[in-house]
Amino acid sequence: MGLAAVLVFFAGIVRGYCGFGFAIIAALCLSFIYSPFDSIAIALSLDLLSSLGLLRGVKQEINKRLLVLLIVGMLGAIPLSLLFITQVSAYQLKMMIAGLSLLAGALIMLNLKMNWLNQRYALLAGAISGFSMTTASAGGPPLVLYLLNLSLNARELRATAIVFFIFSSTASLMGLLYVGAISTHSIQFSLLLFPAAMIGNLVGKKLFRQYPNPSPRKTIAPILMLLALLTILF
């Protein structure tokens, strides 16, 4: 449990600083010591609990119209994602988590600009993020790629992402429990790791105040790619 706490603490720092990335980083790290299904359950549970601690002070910075569209799209993708996850093995799920993380990290690093993207695609972006969240705990990167192309400022991006992932993690956990893909034991175990996640969040928030406007290309992208490669190789 000590190693798990350290890994969760690290994921919390990233989340507190960038506003996203906790679930996928935690799932990648925890998959080294737990099964992929347990890793997703723990990561999503902690993502939800730790996100609540980041809500203070973000209300005025949320893009509310965009948030509603993203949530509607996410909810629409949940049934398909649940059908998918009941058909894959633990090894396939682990490789999927790593593959999506590697791809997302590379795309963020390339900083591709798709000028045609706008809020009309919010439903699709929410659906892709929701599907990735439920199947691989990887809902953060696709959403952030979309938000970056909307040219949101760092504070608006961070606030909108935080609230969206509260809804997304809740919906994913409820769905996974319903189809029996995860157990309540994994969720209960996440409570023991919660203090480490919260301390990480606080450290990340302090770093954000000292070094605002973090660039995803220099922070979360290299972390995702490194962890994904380690997962694939080992």
Image (cartoon, rainbow, N blue to C red):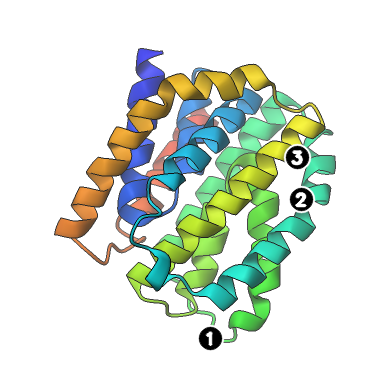
Residue drawn at x 37%, y 52% is: 220
Q: At numbered mark 2, what does the secondary structure look like: helix, strand or loop?
A: helix
Does the CB distance between marks 2 and 3 fall below 8 Å?
yes
Rounded to the nearest angstrom, the CA distance separating label 1 from label 2 is 28 Å
Residue drawn at x 19%, y 58% is: 209
What residue would you read off at disc 3?
175
Place of residue 10 in the rendered image (x, y in percent of width and height, measured from the top left): 33, 35
Nearer-the-camera pick, 223 or 204 = 204
What residue would you read off at disc 2?
78
Q: Earlier in the sequence, mark 2 or mark 3?
A: 2
Rounded to the nearest angstrom, the CA distance separating label 3 from label 1 is 34 Å
Q: Earlier in the sequence, mark 1 or mark 2?
A: 2
What residue would you read off at disc 1?
115
Place of residue 191 in the rendered image (x, y in percent of width and height, measured from the top left): 48, 23
- In this rendering, the label closer to the viewer, 1 or 2: 2
Q: Is residue 134 above or below residue 198?
A: below
Place of residue 119 in the rendered image (x, y in percent of width and height, measured from the top left): 60, 81
Label 1 crowd (10 A; few <14 / some 14-19 / many >=20): few
Q: At numbered mark 3, what does the secondary structure look like: helix, strand or loop?
A: helix
Q: Is residue 111 above or below residue 90?
A: below
Amino acid at pointer 1: Asn
Label 2 crowd (10 A; few <14 / some 14-19 / many >=20): many
Amino acid at pointer 2: Ile
Q: Is residue 136 above or below residue 39?
A: below
Quadrant placement of the N terminus: top left
Q: Quadrant of residue 135?
A: top right
Amino acid at pointer 3: Gly
